[in-house]
């Protein structure tokens, strides 16, 4: 751990957001869901549907991290956080009013460059994991929706059969007196 007044190399990065082609529908806004009986149905892509009025857009927000050249700065404050469940306590170093975690400071320039590379990798990996989780969730919804509609269709077919039979019986009852006369 460093002390107040220590000079350390600080790692800074910039996050750049850019719209990229949706990896689920390849920008077409539609995906094909295949039912158990082999029926193919086209539905709106859930991954690039951002919940707005426009529905599926065929685009998702891609993130990029640009790590800057490390800068030598003097620590002006330190804050040691509470221990988390794994017994690790987080340290925040302050450079004037800007706080940086331990993953953002290094003792030497070379170490800072290495740490910066690792940080970029970690951030990119986190984004990829998040996207994979979202994809899984969206796919689950397709299956859920398909099941819901299939069940609803079956229920309606069952009811239709019941009502058709009832109607037939009613028809017979209505006809009876006519036949008898
Ligand atoms: Zn899409």
Image (spheres, rainbow, N blue to C red):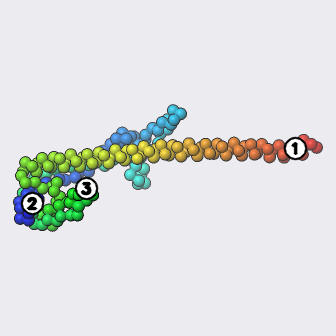
Is residue 19 in view? Answer: no
Is residue 105 in view? Answer: yes
Residue tagged by mark 2? 2
Q: Tags 2 and 1 in contact by the CB under 8 Å rule?
A: no
**Numbered disc in front, either 1 or 3:** 3
Asked if the beta carbon under badge 2 is closer than 8 A to the nearest atom of ligand 1, the reply is no
Q: Quadrant of residue 139?
A: top left
Q: Quadrant of the N terminus?
A: bottom left
State which tag comes first along the sequence, 2 or 1.
Answer: 2
Q: Residue 159 in the image: x percent, y percent?
A: 67, 46
- Please tell me which residue is depicted at 79% across the width and 44% down the height of the picture: 169
Q: Residue 160 in the image: x percent, y percent?
A: 68, 44
Q: Residue 112 in the image: x percent, y percent?
A: 10, 51
Q: Secondary structure at mark 2?
A: loop
Determine which of the numbered discs, if any, sits on residue 86 in the image.
Answer: 3
Instruction: Count residues near mark 2 (Cα–Cα under 10 Å), then give few for <14, some for 14-19, many for 20+.
Output: some
Front position in the image: 28 or 129: 129
Q: Quadrant of residue 30?
A: top left
**Numbered disc in front, either 3 or 2:** 3
Q: Secondary structure at mark 3?
A: loop
State which tag comes first along the sequence, 3 or 2.
Answer: 2
Asked if the beta carbon under badge 3 is closer than 8 A to the nearest atom of ligand 1, the reply is no
Q: Is residue 86 above or below residue 26?
A: below
Q: CA distance from mark 3 to mark 2?
A: 22 Å
Residue tagged by mark 1? 176
Q: Secondary structure at mark 1?
A: helix
Instruction: Count residues near mark 1 (Cα–Cα under 10 Å), then give few for <14, some for 14-19, many for 20+.
Output: few
């Amino acid at each position: 751990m460093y002390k107040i007044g220590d000079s350390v190399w600080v790692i800074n990065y910039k996050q750049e957001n850019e719209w990229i082609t949706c990896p689920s529908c390849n920008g077409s806004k539609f995906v094909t869901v295949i039912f158990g009986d082999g029926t193919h149905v086209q539905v709106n892509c859930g991954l690039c549907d951002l919940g707005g009025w426009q529905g599926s857009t065929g685009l998702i927000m891609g993130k990029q991290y640009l790590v800057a050249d490390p800068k030598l700065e003097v620590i002006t404050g330190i804050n040691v956080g509470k221990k988390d469940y794994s017994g690790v306590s987080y340290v925040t170093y302050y450079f004037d009013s800007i706080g940086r975690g331990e993953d953002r400071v290094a003792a030497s320039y070379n170490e800072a460059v290495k740490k910066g590379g690792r940080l970029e990798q970690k951030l990119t990996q986190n984004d990829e994991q998040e996207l994979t989780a979202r994809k899984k969730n969206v796919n689950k919804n397709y299956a859920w929706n398909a099941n819901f509609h299939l069940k609803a269709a079956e229920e309606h077919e069952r009811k239709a059969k019941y009502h058709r039979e009832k109607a037939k019986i009613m028809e017979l009852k209505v006809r009876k007196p006519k036949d008898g006369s």
